[in-house]
Image (cartoon, helix red, strand yellow):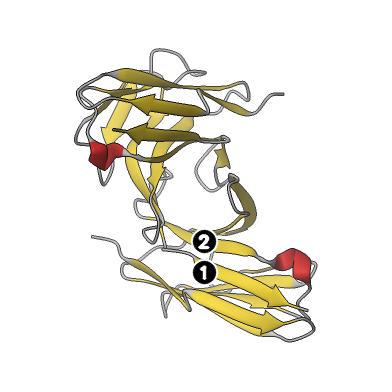
Amino acid sequence: ELKVEQNPLFLSMQEGKNYTIYCNYSTTSDRLYWYRQDPGKSLESLFVLLSNGAVKQEGRLMASLDTKARLSTLHITAAVHDLSATYFCAVDSNFGNEKLTFGTGTRLTIIP
Amino acid sequence: NAGVTQTPKFQVLKTGQSMTLQCAQDMNHEYMSWYRQDPGMGLRLIHYSVGAGITDQGEVPNGYNVSRSTTEDFPLRLLSAAPSQTSVYFCASSRHSGYGYTFGSGTRLTVV
């Protein structure tokens, strides 16, 4: 059974600082996704990582995937208040059918 | 495109009642899934479909039925509602494996 763990679960950080969210998973997979969720809202796709060593960047967010370590990271650079949200990683447990297992999420709060 | 449309947005049921949560997408996506979101537990897969006429169980299928008679629609039926089914339900669709999901706006269900 695929397990997906994120840490930290909660993160408060000051504006302008850098930080990293970690996503570990338990079985072989080379498809990992990052989503953002604002309070009371739906999930928004951020990144799709499809191979070992994949790196994607959008604004102050950068995601990477190491399939050998079964680890993905979401790095936040010079945080701003607008990045406050809950971030989820999700792993495709069976190649080719988009059967995703989600982590429990990281609630990020950016403090002015 | 309307994307993924879920109805209703809010629903209160009495224990033992049945109902259907509707989900429709107009993007001609092959893959569709239903997830439930509970505090502290991330999103858990209920049922998913890789195309019309094909469905399969996810992590928490008990108490729910699905069918996929068309590419566009993927309704979720609660057979006999229980308080444990109080949750936020998200429907999602994907064009193909490796594209990631587009999520609907969610249905907040309360069973009393």
**Residue B110 spot, x, y in % from top left:** 37, 35
Amino acid residing under circle 2: Phe
Q: Residue at x 49, y 18 (%)?
A: B71
Left or right of A87? Residue A75 is right
Question: Which mark is on residue A106?
Answer: 1
* Residue B18 against residue A39 in the figure, above or below: above
**Residue A86 spot, x, y in % from top left:** 57, 62
Disc nearest the viewer among 2 and 1: 1
- Residue A41 visible in this rendered orientation of the protein: yes
Name the residue carrying label 2: A88
Q: Residue at x 40, y 33 (%)?
A: B109
Quadrant in which residue B112 is drawn = top left
Callout 1: chain: A
- Residue A58 visible in this rendered orientation of the protein: no
Q: Secondary structure at mark 1?
A: strand
Left or right of B33? Residue A11 is right
**Residue B79 spot, x, y in % from top left:** 22, 22
Q: Residue at x 22, y 33 (%)?
A: B82
Q: Residue at x 56, y 39 (%)?
A: B103
Amino acid residing under circle 1: Thr
Mark toward the start of the polypeptide (2 vs 1): 2
Verify CB contact (< 8 Å) between mark 2 and mark 1.
yes
Quadrant in which residue A29 is drawn = bottom left
Callout 2: chain: A
Quadrant in which residue A97 is drawn = top left
